[in-house]
Amino acid sequence: VAGGALSGATVSAPATAQARVLAHAAAAISRRPGTIVIERQRSTWSGPRGSTGSDVVTYVTASAAGGRDERDFSSAGGSRAGFQSLNVGNKLELYDPLNRTIYETSLRAWERAVRRQMAASAGPGSRTSSVTFSMSSPTPGRLSVIAQQLRRHLYRVAGPATVSGRSALKLVPIHRTLRLSAHSFEIFGTYYVTPRSYEPIREVFPQITISWLTYRVLPYTAANRWLVSLSARHPGAHIVHGATAYLRASQTQGTTGIRHHR
């Protein structure tokens, strides 16, 4: 290991060198208090007839010093260009570019609105009170999962590689799938990082490829906090409060930024 990079690494590299690379790769994508992380990501799906499409999404994750005031901001591209959502604790916001409107509600109010909608759709006797909800941030969450997997040494260094003309280190999972319980599995992809900074470049699954077009870590300063404020990004936008309006707008966009679990 020289300069923080594994030089000429192979699967037979010393265990200490392997462990050091995995530790650096995990640290590079771990959230740190007092920072704002910007990711621009392209996801591509492939099948027997080749690529079936791609979507570009920007994610911004901010955490103030001490781990307080954590924010997750997402901006979708492709067919949903301009869609933006922000999760801050119990507060949910969504920006609709078609009418330049910011919709605001709370997570609790949104939960109640979803339950009402589910009950109306399912009809009498349906059980919606047992449904619980949690915040979902696709890309920051995915990198957190990868970091945990790296710390558990569930990857091995397969050596240097080239990804779209860029020098990279190839990290291969020890298991493609790992059973967590009778009904759940942990899925792994081949993960590529930069040789010295260990920032993410690409994650490859059999039918999905995730490419990081941008990965930047900025200080959590007053000048940068506008990145995770929809009202600051759109100062002339109309603001509408209420869970029903938020739910309707989020469903129009095709996503809510939230997932529910039974």
Image (cartoon, rainbow, N blue to C red):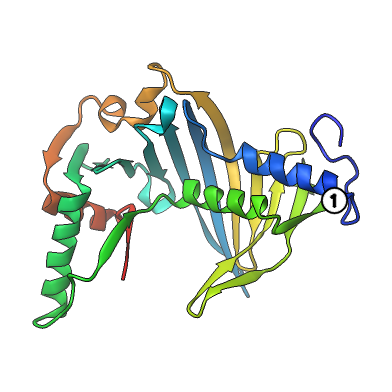
Dot 1 surroundings within 10 Å: few (below 14), some, or many (20 or more)?
A: few
Corner quadrant of residue 259: bottom left
Quarter of the image where one finds residue 23: top right
Q: How many marks?
A: 1
How far from the left and from the top, in percent, is residue 21? 76, 43
157 w.r.t. 94: above or below: below
Q: Is residue 72 visible?
A: yes
Type of the residue with mark 1: Ala
Q: Could you tell me which quadrant the C terminus lies in?
A: bottom left
Q: Residue at x 74, y 53 (%)?
A: 171
How far across and down, in percent of the image, does residue 220 sit?
A: 44, 23
Residue furthest left as drawn:
124
Where does the image place residue 117, in percent across and percent down from the top left?
Answer: 14, 67
Indicate the position of residue 2 as horizontal and vertical percent values. Answer: 86, 32
Does 40 sit left or right of 24 as displayed?
left
Considering only vertical position in the picture, is 195 above or below 11?
above
Judged left or right of residue 106, residue 197 is right
Determine the secondary structure under disc 1: helix
- Quadrant that contains the N terminus: top right
| Residue 227 in the image: above or below residue 194 | above
**Residue 176 location, quadrant:** bottom right
Could one spot residue 255 in this view of the protein? Answer: no
Q: Name the residue located 63 percent from the left edge and 38 percent from the top edge.
A: 27
Query: Closest to the observer: 130 or 189?
Result: 130
**Mark 1 = which residue?**
15
Which residue is the extreme one toward the bottom?
125
Residue at 11% in and 80% down: 123
Closer to the camera, 202 or 115? 115
- Could you tell me which residue is drawn at 53 percent across and 46 percent down? 41
